[in-house]
Image (cartoon, grey):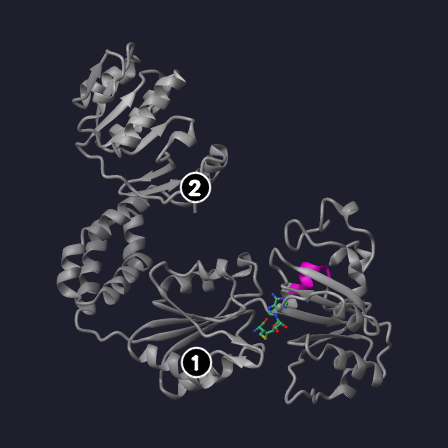
């Protein structure tokens, strides 16, 4: 983050505006909307700006700018057409530790004006960190469409309850939950519909009911999908915003973790193969203890919580102690990786079924019902199969699957780092030995893998999962090597 977004309280503060043309007018409009009192230094002045100064008790100084103009000033904006004057203002302000903005000159600014969505008292500022104001404005128009003006009223309404809520509900956490109920529920709907009086009655009832109730904790077992944050479900995103504590593991990407509430506590319970950071039993216990204390706990898991995710064990423990929970499915690695690597898991002509198998070694062994995996019409997907890859391929060939059966290893599927090694049961183990592979990886075996080649799905997508996968196809020679 290059700039920290802060919101400046400028009411009745003096702001110096150097310059009096059209550009200065635009800034003056914003500054006066925030209640600032302007001092404008310029030889000639735009008539709109002059009127603004008169209305808002501002001052127009016609003398040349001098550093003494900075006295008693909270903020300064330089908007003259003269680069030397602008630079001088920036230098003087820097020396005096006064925040300064020089219009269209980010290198001289200590703050920038964001694009603004004004739903006062709700205000949203957007910046592209001086890269592209056009992109900021595009984002602004999208947000404007998303947030109707009535949201400002909702913020005002909720703000009106501050003192009453503080007096009635003792802890920060319970207060937050009250507000969540307030804005998400019927009260919020009424306010947005313009029925503030009805909303007030209901809100007071809600407050009364929230007074002495001991909070009940809850656990959300959330599937985070395989990596691309856009594969998160709406429900997962919503519950993540509600959780007080987030327990996450290694498969959860930082972008997804970022979607949790900013002040939520984050606890890493990651497990690495052979090195269990936190044993499963302890995780189950931790979930229970936190929920018993009344917290809303999100247990965020890679992929789907019920597919090789041990979600079943966690909810069993919770259920046996009467802790309420919700399970939110996620896109499992098989679906995500296959889709983003151009491999349909089933296909009318090539595979009528698909099987998800754990390739996790137990005591260096893989005891699996190999004889069941021999149909050439079935796609096999091995989770945790990298270590046992050689054994898997050997066993499948040994039990009758053709050694030229297409096979692919998808690495860090659906993320920007996705790579796919594709070969056959006979060749894949050798390929993997000669390349550096980054976990997590998923092994997909079956005729459907060949379709990827036929689609020309070489290289990885500039936009994950899109076709054609890469714009600069010629940079990738045809063949599996193009993928690595
Ligand atoms: N619950 C998860 C699976 C957990 S088991 C799910 O539904 O996807 C962990 C294994 O999942 C990893 O060893 C790997 O085989 C696979 N996996 C998870 N995310 C992956 C990804 N982004 N790319 C490739 N494999 C992945």
| Residue count near mark 2 (Cα–Cα under 10 Å), binned few <14, some 14–19, many ≥20 | few
Q: Does the magenta stretch include residue 153?
A: no
Residue tagged by mark 2? 145
The quarter of the picture showing ligand 1: bottom right
First of labels 1, 2 by sequence position? 2
Residue closest to the eye, 170 or 420: 420
Q: In this view, does 8 lie to the left or right of 387?
A: left
Residue visible at 71% across and 51% down in the picture: 469
Give the magenta part as a residue range.
Answer: 337-343
Q: In this view, does 74 lie to the left or right of 358?
A: left
Q: Distance between the residues labelled 1 and 2?
A: 42 Å
Residue 368 to residue 13: above or below: below
At which x and y percent is residue 198?
A: 22, 54
| Residue count near mark 1 (Cα–Cα under 10 Å), binned few <14, some 14–19, many ≥20 | some
SS of the residue at dot 2?
Answer: helix
Residue closest to the eye, 444 or 278: 278
Q: Quadrant of the C terminus?
A: bottom right
Q: In this view, does 345 lie to the left or right of 157?
A: right
At which x and y percent is residue 372?
A: 76, 86
Count of picture labels: 2
Residue closest to the eye, 103 or 295: 103
SS of the residue at dot 1?
Answer: helix
Residue tagged by mark 1? 283
Q: In which quarter of the image is residue 306?
A: bottom right
């Amino acid at each position: 983050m290059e700039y920290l977004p802060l919101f400046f309280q400028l009411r009745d503060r003096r702001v110096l505006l150097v310059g009096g043309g059209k550009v200065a007018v635009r800034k003056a409009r914003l500054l006066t909307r925030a209640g600032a009192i302007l001092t404008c230094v310029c030889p000639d002045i735009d008539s709109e700006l002059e009127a603004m100064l008169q209305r808002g008790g501002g001052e127009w100084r016609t003398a040349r700018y001098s550093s003494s103009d900075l006295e008693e000033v909270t903020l300064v904006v330089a908007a003259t057409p003269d680069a030397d004057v602008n630079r001088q203002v920036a230098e003087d302000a820097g020396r005096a530790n006064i925040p300064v903005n020089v219009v269209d000159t980010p290198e001289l600014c200590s703050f920038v004006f964001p694009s603004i969505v004004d739903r006062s008292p709700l205000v949203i500022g957007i910046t592209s960190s001086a890269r592209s104001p056009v992109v900021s404005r595009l984002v602004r128009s999208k947000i404007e469409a998303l947030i109707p003006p009535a949201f400002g009223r909702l913020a005002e309404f909720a703000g009106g309850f501050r003192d009453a809520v503080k007096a009635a509900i003792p802890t920060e956490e319970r207060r937050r939950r009250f507000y969540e109920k307030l804005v998400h529920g019927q009260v919020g709907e009424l306010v947005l519909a313009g029925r503030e009086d009805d909303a007030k009655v209901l809100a007071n009832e809600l407050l009364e009911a929230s007074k002495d109730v001991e909070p009940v904790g809850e656990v959300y077992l959330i599937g985070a999908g395989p990596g691309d944050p856009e594969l998160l479900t709406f429900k997962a995103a919503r519950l993540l915003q509600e959780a007080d504590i987030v327990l996450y593991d290694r498969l959860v990407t930082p972008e997804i973790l970022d979607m949790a509430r900013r002040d939520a506590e984050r606890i890493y319970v990651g497990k690495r193969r052979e090195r269990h950071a936190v044993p499963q039993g302890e995780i189950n216990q931790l979930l229970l203890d936190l929920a018993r204390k009344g917290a809303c706990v999100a247990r965020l898991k890679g992929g789907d919580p019920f597919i090789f995710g041990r979600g079943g064990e966690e909810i069993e423990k919770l259920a046996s102690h009467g802790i309420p929970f919700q399970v939110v499915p996620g896109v499992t690695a098989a679906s995500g990786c296959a889709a983003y690597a151009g491999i349909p898991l089933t296909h009318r002509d090539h595979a009528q079924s698909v099987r998800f198998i754990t390739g996790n070694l137990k005591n260096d062994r893989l005891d699996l019902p190999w004889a069941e995996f021999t149909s050439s019409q079935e796609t096999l997907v091995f989770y945790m199969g990298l270590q046992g890859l050689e054994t898997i391929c050997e066993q499948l060939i040994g039990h009758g699957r053709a050694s030229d059966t297409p096979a692919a290893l998808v690495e860090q599927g659906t993320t920007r780092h996705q790579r796919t090694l594709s070969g056959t049961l006979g060749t894949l183990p050798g390929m993997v030995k000669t390349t550096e592979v980054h976990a997590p990886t998923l092994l997909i075996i079956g005729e459907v893998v060949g379709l990827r080649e036929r689609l020309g799905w070489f290289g990885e997508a500039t936009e994950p999962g899109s076709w054609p996968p890469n714009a600069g196809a010629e940079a990738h020679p045809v063949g599996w090597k193009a993928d690595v």
